[in-house]
Image (spheres, helix red, strand yellow):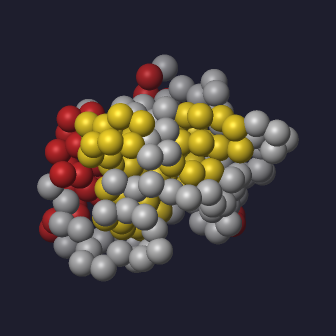
Amino acid sequence: MRNRILNVLRGLVWPAVSSRSRLNAECYMSVSMQNPPTGPEYVELYHLLTEILTWVDPTYVCTHVAVTKNFVGSPHVDRSDKAFQFALGVGEYIGGELVIESESHEKLYVVDTHDRIVKIDGRRLHWVRGFQGERYSLVFFCLDTNNGTALSWSVYQDFVPDGTT
């Protein structure tokens, strides 16, 4: 699946202008899962995102997926999110770990997302470390208040994708 994800992302037609111009990313797009892009160049991406979500957690209500190329993030909190997130990094890179502040604000978790999907809560302070190479990321998130979850763990360390059980 990793190679298929990487091939789809490498072949993407990225929007000419990022919808989030203040982000430090070569390319960025937000894909609405309720109102998917209609262009033929995005059909394969949408189907792939749906397949990943079904494998990860078929009960998770994902409203959007942030798709990035070579994103390095400064510390921020995803204030509009209503639930935890799933994050995945793919590509040929070194570094690029996700750093998330603990629930107590007293320590930092360093999470490796390279070729693995993790369950984290972006409503906690987090960022992406610098890296070398080509790095794509997919972040599945929910903006629907009806499907919100309580703010609890920064990192769900025991998380196992549903499709692996």
Location of residue 101 in the rendering, given as x and y in whole percent from the top left corner = 71, 44
Location of residue 150 in the rendering, given as x and y in whole percent from the top left corner = 78, 51
Q: Would residue 31 be visible to someone looking at this image?
A: no
Q: Quadrant of residue 89?
A: top left
In this view, the residue in front, 130 or 3, is: 130
Q: Quadrant of residue 133?
A: top left
In this view, the residue in front, 164 or 113, is: 113
Location of residue 12 in the rendering, given as x and y in whole percent from the top left corner = 19, 60
In this view, the residue in front, 49 or 106, is: 106
* Quarter the N terminus occupies: top left
In this view, the residue in front, 32 or 70, is: 70
User: What residue is at 15 percent from the left and 55 percent from the top?
Assistant: 11
Judge whether 32 appears above or below 111 on screen. Answer: below
Q: Would residue 94 be visible to someone looking at this image?
A: yes
**Residue found at the far top of this picture:** 165
Judge whether 137 appears above or below 36 on screen. Answer: above
User: What residue is at 70 percent from the left and 38 percent from the top?
Assistant: 108
Q: Is residue 9 left or right of residue 50?
A: left
Number of callouts = 0
Judge whether 105 appears above or below 147 on screen. Answer: above
User: What residue is at 42 percent from the left and 77 percent from the top?
Assistant: 21
User: What residue is at 27 percent from the left and 46 percent from the top?
Assistant: 134
Location of residue 10 in the rendering, given as x and y in whole percent from the top left corner = 18, 51
Q: Is residue 106 left or right of residue 111?
A: right
Q: Is residue 157 left or right of residue 114?
A: right
